[in-house]
Image (tube, helix red, strand yellow):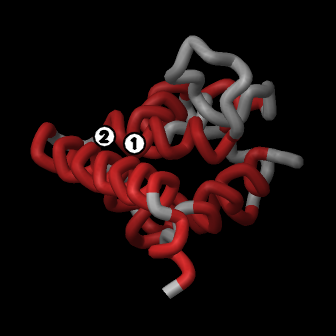
Amino acid sequence: MNQCDRIRQILKENKLKQKQFASVIGVTESYISKLLKDPNIRLSQSLAVLIEEKYGYNSEWILYGNEPKLKQISKDKSLSELHQKALAQLEKMNDEQVKAILAFINSLDELEKTLQTNPHNSEK
């Protein structure tokens, strides 16, 4: 997998159009188009770090394909890629958004406790 493929994968995994991606990282859409077509065009280290900050992909993976693909946020190295991606998204959120996510998680915990204490409710 070359750098073109890795940039393409970032776009696909984040459901981004070239224009959206270019806007977020502060480059032109034509530059992104060139990056996707020409494996000889190398992304700068600073741009790779910006992508890492915005989308959670390890800059070394973006530039050279070195694992891990996602920036390690947690000290728990056994987390799945999905868990790492969720943590990367949380890291970008403001306090109010994080509070909303925590409220949702707490409501799931409460629902699970209710179902465990009264299993007949889940059959209705």
- Residue 17 visible within the image: no
Q: Secondary structure at mark 2?
A: helix
Q: Which residue is mark 2?
A: 92
Q: Whole-percent x and y of residue 59?
A: 60, 29
Q: Whole-percent x and y of residue 120?
A: 52, 73
Q: Whole-percent x and y of residue 24?
A: 34, 54
Q: Quadrant of residue 28?
A: bottom left
Q: Residues within 10 Å of mark 1 (few under 14, many from 20)?
A: some
Left or right of 104? Residue 124 is: right
Query: Of discs 1 and 2, which sits in the foreground?
Result: 2
- For residue 54, the mark is 1
Q: Residues within 10 Å of mark 2 (few under 14, many from 20)?
A: some
Q: Is residue 85 above or below residue 35?
A: above
Residue at the image position 34 percent from the left and 51 percent from the top: 110
Q: Is residue 77 above or below residue 15?
A: above
Measured in 3D between alpha carbons, the distance from the residue under mark 1 to the one under mark 2, in whole angstroms, is 8 Å
Residue located farthest toward the bottom when viewing the structure as drawn: 124
Residue at the image position 49 percent from the left and 34 percent from the top: 52
Q: Earlier in the sequence, mark 1 or mark 2?
A: 1
Q: Whole-percent x and y of residue 115?
A: 47, 61
Under mark 1, the amino acid is Lys
Residue located farthest toward the right when viewing the structure as drawn: 1
Pick whichever, 57 or 92, lies toward us.
92
Left or right of 97? Residue 16 is: right
Residue at the image position 48 percent from the left and 28 percent from the top: 49
Residue located farthest toward the top when viewing the structure as drawn: 75
